[in-house]
Amino acid sequence: MGSASPQTSQFWPSGWYLRHVLSCRNVEELLAERGIEVDHVSIYRWVQTFTPLLIDAARTRRHGGGDRWSVDETYLRVSGRWMYLDRAVDQFAQVIDVVLSDKRDLPAARRFSEQTLSHSSRPAEINTDRAAPAVIDELLPDACHVSDQYPNNRVESDHARPVVVVTGGHALIQNIPRAHYELAVDRDNHHRVAVTVYTTDPDHDGRTTKVQ
């Protein structure tokens, strides 16, 4: 598989990895079954390289977030280090943003809040089970802040396989079928990811490009 046509040879396996609960070795095996030989390390590199490109390309088509957010964090191990993954989800199940931090402190809370607000409209209500009230009160003085573990079940029950760059890719793949992006909205939700991720031409008419 060469690098001359990354949309078909590299976006395709990357899309599989992000869309399904697969490891890079799983994707390697699926490709091998189709007569395509590629090492799982290459697939890992493609995911890390092309996921940010997919996110950036789709950003201008993204719908504004809802006015009620749930924010939570999970503790995870990345390359041998324990880190915190913060994620915000609105009432329509749209993942607003994800941020990975090595500390659980005020600067980390501020960075997450500022980055998330830069990608969406400002919420009228925000639910957290652990919060930096000073940051929320400063950045969202008019918002209703609810500090309770139960409103965040939406977030806690839906954490993807979070690993740095991949978390943003999972958010994108989750959001596209839910029509949170103006992408392939004329197709049913089961085909929107395929049309968006596997189409080779950005000016394509919306039909999936079949790769043998």
Image (tube, grey):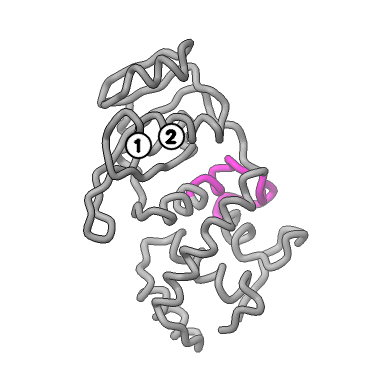
Earlier residue among tags 1 and 2 = 2
Image vertical order of residue 80 relative to residue 12, above or below: above
Using the image, determine if residue 58 lies above or below residue 149.
below
Quadrant including the N terminus: bottom right
**What amino acid is found at the position of numbered circle 2 in the picture?**
Val
Percent x, y of residue 8: 62, 73
Comparing 101 with 206, the one in front is 101
Amino acid type at image mark 1: Val
**Residue bearing the label numbered 1:** 155
Q: Residues within 10 Å of mark 1 (few under 14, many from 20)?
A: many
- Tell me how many marks there are: 2
SS at badge 2: strand
**How far is mark 1 from mark 2, CA to CA?**
7 Å
Q: Is residue 183 magenta?
A: yes
**Would you say 69 lies left or right of 148 here?**
right
Quadrant in the picture for residue 40:
bottom left
Magenta part of the chain: 174-190
Q: Residue at x 36, y 61 (%)?
A: 21
Image quarter where the C terminus lies is bottom right
Q: Which residue is mark 2?
A: 89
Tell me, yes or no, whether the two marked residues, 1 and 2, touch with CB atoms within 8 Å. Answer: yes
Residue 160: percent from left, percent from top? 36, 50
Residue nearest the observer in this picture, 89 or 118: 118
Magenta span: predominant SS is loop
**Toward the viewer: 209 or 120?**
120
